[in-house]
Amino acid sequence: QVHLVESGGGLVQAGGSLRLSCVASRRTFNDLAMGWFRQAPGKERDFVASINWSGATDYTDSVKGRFTISRDSTKNTLYLQMNSLKPEDTAVYYCAAGRFAYRSGRREADFGSWGQGTQVTVSS
């Protein structure tokens, strides 16, 4: 288990930017995939982006070209840079750490540790 703490959410106008951060309690990037999910009101939690142990990234189609996932191993911190935000990006965003070493995926079941979430609200 990894303890994860997100920050950086807030209220922004459409077209604006936010950067989410997620600090991990221990080194995880060497062998675990890290990901961001989001949950809009009344909807299921959905995959947004991930980065694996080798630095390979994956994005859901709706955020490609707008969001960038990255990490700083020296700070045990995962980031999600969100540009050109749209009202439909409004959701609670969760950071997650992979359940097993050297395994990645887009399902919630692929991730075993979760942060508490941070609210992102995009106004039109």
Image (cartoon, rainbow, N blue to C red):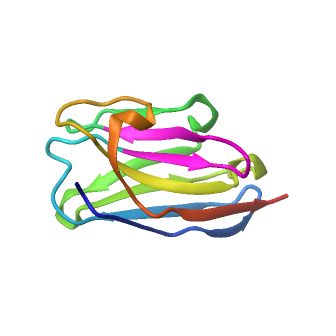
> Measured from the top left, where is residue 74 in percent x and y?
17, 64
Which image quarter holds the N terminus?
Answer: bottom left
Q: Is residue 52 magenta?
A: no
3 or 63, which lies in front? Answer: 3
Query: Main SS of the magenta segment?
Result: strand
Q: Residue at x 68, y 49 (%)?
A: 40
> Measured from the top left, where is residue 115 in percent x and y?
41, 60
> Measured from the top left, where is residue 11 in percent x and y?
70, 70
Which image quarter holds the C terminus?
Answer: bottom right
Count of marks placed on residues: 0
- In the rendered view, tell whether residue 99 sits above or below residue 94: above
Q: Which residues are magenta?
A: 35-51
Q: Is residue 47 magenta?
A: yes
Left or right of 51: which side holds 69?
right
Left or right of 83: which side holds 49?
left
Q: Residue at x 34, y 41 (%)?
A: 111
Q: Residue at x 28, y 63 (%)?
A: 3
